[in-house]
Amino acid sequence: MFRRTTALLAGSVTALALFVTACGETGQGASPTAKKTGEVTFWSFVKGSDKVAAAFNRSHPDIKVTFETVPSGQEYYSKLTNAVKAGTAPDVAVVEYPHLPEFAAQGKVEDLSGTLGPLVKERFPEATRQLVDLGGRTWGVPRDAAPLMLMYRKDFFTRHKIEVPTTWDAYRTMTEQVKKADPAARGGVLYTDNPGVLEALSWQAGGQWFSTGKDSWKVTVDDGPSKKVGSFWGDLARKDLVRSLSQLDPFWTSVQKSRTVAYVCASWCAGAHQATVPDQKGKWAVAPVPTWDGKPASGMYGGSSFVIPKGSDNSGAAAEFIKWITTDPEGMKAWVSSGTSSMFPADPGLVPVTKAAFKTDYYGGQDIYALMARSYDAIPPRWTWGPVMGATNTALVDQLPKVADGSVNLPDALSTAERITLTQMKQRGLTVTAP
C-alpha cells in the first residue's frame, strides 16, 4: 500500500518555482503560535463534511466550526477565488490536487510550512507529500487519494451472463452486450461537464499532459496515449454504447432507473453511490478499472487537500481543524461513518481505521478497500498537473457536449484544450517550450 515512486508528481516542485517567477512571491503564512480557539468557517463539497464539522465541535469546545456547503467543480473554484479577492474567504477550504498548484502560485492560500508542514512530512509518504509540497513549501494537507475503480450492477451482469471486463477491448464488448440485453441500459458514461475521468484515464494510459524543465513548461494535452483514450471514448459515445450525461442529477437518475449499469469512477464513489441510490443495496459491486493490456494500471480521479485561504480570520484554529480532519483516527471515522464517504486516506496509517468504519454491506461485504489499495499501487508515475488547470478544464468542458452530439471528436477537443492552455500560460508570463 502506498508503494509509490518518488517520481510521482515530482515536476510539481519545479512547477511552483516557475509559477513564482511569473506571479511574484507568495509570502509567508500564519505563525505557528497563532491562537487555537474561536470560530472557523469551513467550505467543502466533499461528502461527509457536515458530519466531520459536527464531530469536531463535540470534541473541541474551544473552537466552533461553521460548515458551509459549496458547489463542486469550476463554479466552486471561481467562488473561492472571488472570496479571497473580496476579503470574505473562509478559514478552511477544500482544494483538489489538480487545482492546488494554481492556487498556491497566485497567492490565494496560506503557506503552511511553519504550521502544518512538519505534520505533512511526518504522516504522509513522499509521493503524497509532493501533491501539496510545491516549491519547497507546504500549501495544503492531503485528505485522500482517489484511485480508479469500475462500478457495476452485479445482478444485471449475472442475469445476462456478461463478464466483468479486465481490458478496454473487453469493456467495449461489455457495452455492446448491455445495450443488446436492454436497449435502454448502457455500460458507461461520458460526462459532458467534468473532464476528471478523461484526465484519469489519460494518466492511466501513460499520458503526460504537463512536464517541466529547468525554466519552462512543456504541454502535451493531446499526446499519443491521451488521443488513444479520446478516440476510444469518443467512439463509444458516437455509437451510443455509453451515455453522454452531466455528472449530477441526470447521471444519478439514470442509475436509479437502471439505465446506467456500469461506470468508471474512483474510491470515493462507493460512498457517494450508496448514499444516493440506497434502494439498490446488494445489486452493485466494485472491480478494478480495465486496462489496455490487462496488466494493473490506474489513475487518480479527484483527491483532495485542505487549505487555509489567504485572509483567514483565524488561521491558528483553522490549522487545528485541518490537522484533526486529515490525521486523527476520530476524524477519519467521522468522514466515513455516515456511509456517504468511502475516502481512501492519504495517511497510510489510517487506512485500517477507515476500512473498519465504512460499512460495505451495500456491496455484499466486498473488501473494497483492498481493491482501492491495489488500484493506488498501480498508478503510473510522472503525471504533473498544469499551472492553469481551471482554463484547461473549462476548455474541455466547452467541447464535451459537442463530442456528445457528434459535432466534435474527442481527440480534437484535446487539441483545442491544449491551444487554449498554451495561450493562458503565455498570458500569465510562463515560459513554454514546443513539444
Image: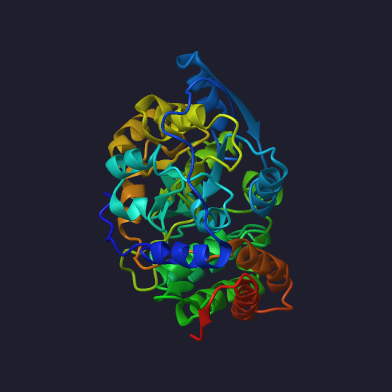
Total marks drawn?
Answer: 0
Q: How is the image coloured?
A: rainbow
User: Foreground: 328 or 47?
Assistant: 328
- Is 180 on the left-hand or right-hand side of 61? right
Q: Is residue 290 visible?
A: no
Q: Residue at x 32, y 49 (%)?
A: 373
x then y, percent, for residue 129: 35, 51
Q: Is residue 260 visible?
A: yes
- Is 6 on the left-hand or right-hand side of 158? left
Q: Residue at x 39, y 38 (%)?
A: 116
User: Foreground: 281 or 396?
Assistant: 396
x then y, percent, for residue 412: 63, 81
x then y, percent, for residue 134: 42, 56
Q: Is residue 236 above or below residue 10?
A: below
x then y, percent, for residue 263: 53, 56
Q: Residue at x 63, y 79 (%)?
A: 419
User: Foreground: 262 or 319?
Assistant: 319
